[in-house]
Image (cartoon, grey):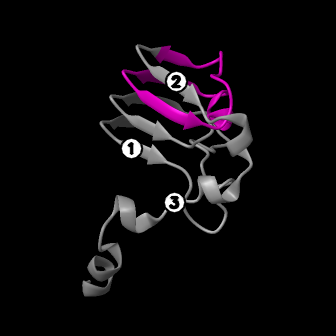
């Protein structure tokens, strides 16, 4: 898998605390993420994979930076512990990221 200049964000859906896992794949996988943005996510399930992150910005992550991953020239910040289990803080409105998404879907 190759993802260049992509955004991966958690906090959406019915259960914002449990929907932000990247690459929850049970089999072998090679993945490269370059110049991407990651927010409110977990990289827990990516640890077993051959994954490299290059020039990525990782903000409000759900847990410490995994030592098993290859991070090249990346920034990594963790969500404050007092907010990590707060559903209201995690919840995000899809309309903020994709204005008028419902109208676009209905037109098709």
Tag 1–tag 2 contact (CB < 8 Å): no
The one of 35 and 16 positioned closer to us in this rendering? 16
Of the two numbered discs 3 and 2 on the same chain, state the one appearing first in sequence. Answer: 2
Q: Alpha carbon of mark 1 to alpha carbon of mark 2: how far?
A: 15 Å
Question: Who's the residue at 37% across and 34% down the image?
Answer: 36
**44 part of magenta stretch:** yes
Q: In the displayed structure, would residue 74 be above or below residue 85?
A: above
Q: Is residue 2 left or right of 47 when viewed as pictured?
A: left
Label disc, if present, on residue 76 of the rendered structure: 2
In the rendering, at what x and y percent does residue 85 appear?
Answer: 74, 48
**Mark 2: few, some, or many residues within 10 Å (few <14, many ≥20)?**
some
**Mark 3: few, some, or many residues within 10 Å (few <14, many ≥20)?**
some
Of the two numbered discs 1 and 2 on the same chain, state the one appearing first in sequence. Answer: 1
**54 part of magenta stretch:** yes
Q: Which residues are magenta?
A: 43-71
Question: Who's the residue at 31% across and 86% down the image?
Answer: 106
Of the two numbered discs 3 and 1 on the same chain, state the one appearing first in sequence. Answer: 1
In the rendering, at what x and y percent does residue 31 appear?
Answer: 47, 31
Find disc 1 in the rendering and name its residue.
7
Question: Who's the residue at 67% across and 37% down the image?
Answer: 45
Q: Alpha carbon of mark 3 to alpha carbon of mark 1: how far?
A: 15 Å
Label disc, if present, on residue 92 of the rendered structure: 3
Residue 1 shows up from this direction: no
In the rendering, at what x and y percent does residue 17 appear?
Answer: 68, 53
**Which quadrant: the C terminus?**
bottom left
- Quadrant of res 103: bottom left
In the rendering, at what x and y percent does residue 35 appear?
Answer: 32, 28
Per the image, label 1 sits on a secondary structure element best described as strand
């Amino acid at each position: 898998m190759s993802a260049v200049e992509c955004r991966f964000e958690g906090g959406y859906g019915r259960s914002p605390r449990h929907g932000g896992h990247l690459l929850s794949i049970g089999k072998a996988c090679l993945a490269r993420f370059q110049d991407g943005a990651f927010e409110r996510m977990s990289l827990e399930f990516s640890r077993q994979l051959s994954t490299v992150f290059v020039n990525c910005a990782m903000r409000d992550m759900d847990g410490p930076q995994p030592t098993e991953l290859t991070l090249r020239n990346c920034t990594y910040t963790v969500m404050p512990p007092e907010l990590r289990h707060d559903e209201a803080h995690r919840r995000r409105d899809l309309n903020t990221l994709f204005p008028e998404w419902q109208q676009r879907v209905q037109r098709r």
